[in-house]
Image (cartoon, grey):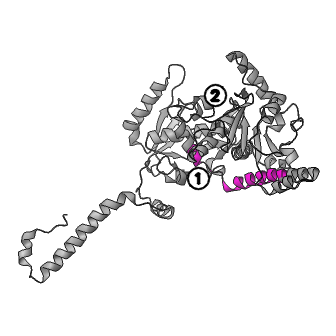
Amino acid sequence: MSILLDLKHLRHISLPTRPFICKCLLVVIGLVILRAIISPFLAISSSEKSFYESRALDLFPGVRKNKFVEVPQIIWGLNNQKIAFARACLTAKFLNRSLLMPSLSASLFYKEVDLLQPITFDKVFDFNKFNARCHGFVRLARYSEISDHTEPFKLQKGSGRRWTVDRDLDQLQQSRLGEADDYEVIHVTGKHPFLWPDHWPVKDYARIFDCLALAPEIETEVVKVISKIKDAGKKARHEAAISHNNKRIYGSTNLSVQYIAVHMRIEKDWMIHCKKWEQRSNSKEICSSKGEIIHKVSQITDLRRPVVVYLAVADSLLEDDSVTSGWRVGMIAYEKKKLGVTDIYDRQPYLIKSAIDFEVCSRADVFVGNSFSTFSNLVVLSRTERLYNLGKASSCGEDVGLSSYAYNIIGDDGGPQRWMTDMSDTSLQRISYGTNNISCH
């Protein structure tokens, strides 16, 4: 309906009334024009956004809330599961559907699938925070949102060498536009998501990982561990100040306590695996001994000493339990037992233990890892994303904070190679399977 009146009808309106109507029309027209001008600049606060979302109004761009994708149980290690989850999210996004909250695996078994302990996503990560952070990009849904409980459309993922990346993408495109789109739920069968062909750039994965926040009860455990590390750092500073009897050093105890986290891959299963890997790839930049790691880490000068070095290591798989000995003066190494946090880890299943260690490493002032480890790669990706958000696209030649290093690769200065994720990569291949082609930008 037009807001303008036919001017011919004004002839039938008394003269005293005409000016009043004309003024009203001018006001209405002015308000419409003003709204059209300023509406693109209006920002919606988080409280208003929650208000609208709670009423299921699609006022923002995003995926459909009444169409869903269901995936098999996600398995293997923590970071393989995170990659699989992100890949499932991006697949659902491509199909313009919400991803039904998947089941993760609390235990670590590679072949005995029947021994896997399923654990729902929201027991590890915060469901509501994920959807709030990723709003308009991807969306998680609960099974209670399904209205039509008829059989879903079964999408069989292909396998073998003939199932190429292009064939997989063609299948997804057909499912987005063809018969499958009429179904409320598309159930993906076959390979689990980590093994699906990869169609998505690193920056999309980084965005999803950035949306993951630990469930509150697990976050509490992370804070406890980091608090213990910082208490150890305060103690080291205090003892150094007393031994030197130096006011300058004692004054430094008032500075914020920093720490280095080292993902120390020297467990017996890793050493067997990486030695075979080196033989196949004809490379000498995958495995590192305890002595080599200590030597490399000692060459990092980003932080004031004394400094605590937290060793993220699978203690039960170690052949040598003396990982905290042999470190240089001013570097005080702690693992879980020495730090006094074994009770925190022992009461948790494998997946939660790994999630705690991941966050402790990700939040460290300096992180040192192995560029062929998926765990290390995802920690560095997380830290690189935070640096990019701060407007820092390089860590070369300067201390920009949140520094990361690879101890298995020698840098230009003879120490460990500075390390940032290449955010322009078109797939997650190098992060998933490792690489020695890394740099500081």
* Majority secondary structure of magenta residues: helix
> In the image, residue 76 lies at what x, y percent?
67, 35
Picture coordinates of residue 399, whole percent (x, y): 68, 42
The x and y percentages for residue 432 are 62, 31
Looking at the rendered image, the quarter that the C terminus falls into is top right
**Mark 1 or mark 2, which is nearer the start of the sequence?**
1
**Within 10 Å of the Cα at label 2, are there few (<14), some (14-19), or many (20+) other Cα atoms?**
few
Where 89 sits versus 26, above or below? above
Report which residue position mark 1 lands on. Answer: 127
- Whether residue 85 is visible, yes or no, is yes
Mark 2–mark 1 Cα distance, whole angstroms, equals 28 Å
- Give the magenta part as a residue range: 208-233
Give residue 104's quadrant in the image. top right
Q: Is residue 334 left or right of residue 150?
A: right
Q: Which residue is at a point 23% across and 67% down the rendered structure image?
A: 29
Query: Nearest the camera: 324 or 55?
Result: 324
Residue under the image location 72 percent in, 16 percent down: 279
Q: Nearer the viewer, mark 2 or mark 1?
A: 2
Q: Quadrant of residue 261?
A: top right
Is 424 within the magenta?
Answer: no
Residue matched to label 2: 433
Report if residue 75 is visible in the image. no
Q: Amino acid at mark 2?
A: Tyr
The verdict on residue 217 being magenta is: yes
**Amino acid type, callout 1:** Phe
User: Of the numbered discs in the image, which one, if any, rests on residue 170?
Assistant: none
Q: Nearer the viewer, residue 174 or 401?
A: 401
Name the residue located 86 percent from the left edge and 45 percent from the top edge.
337
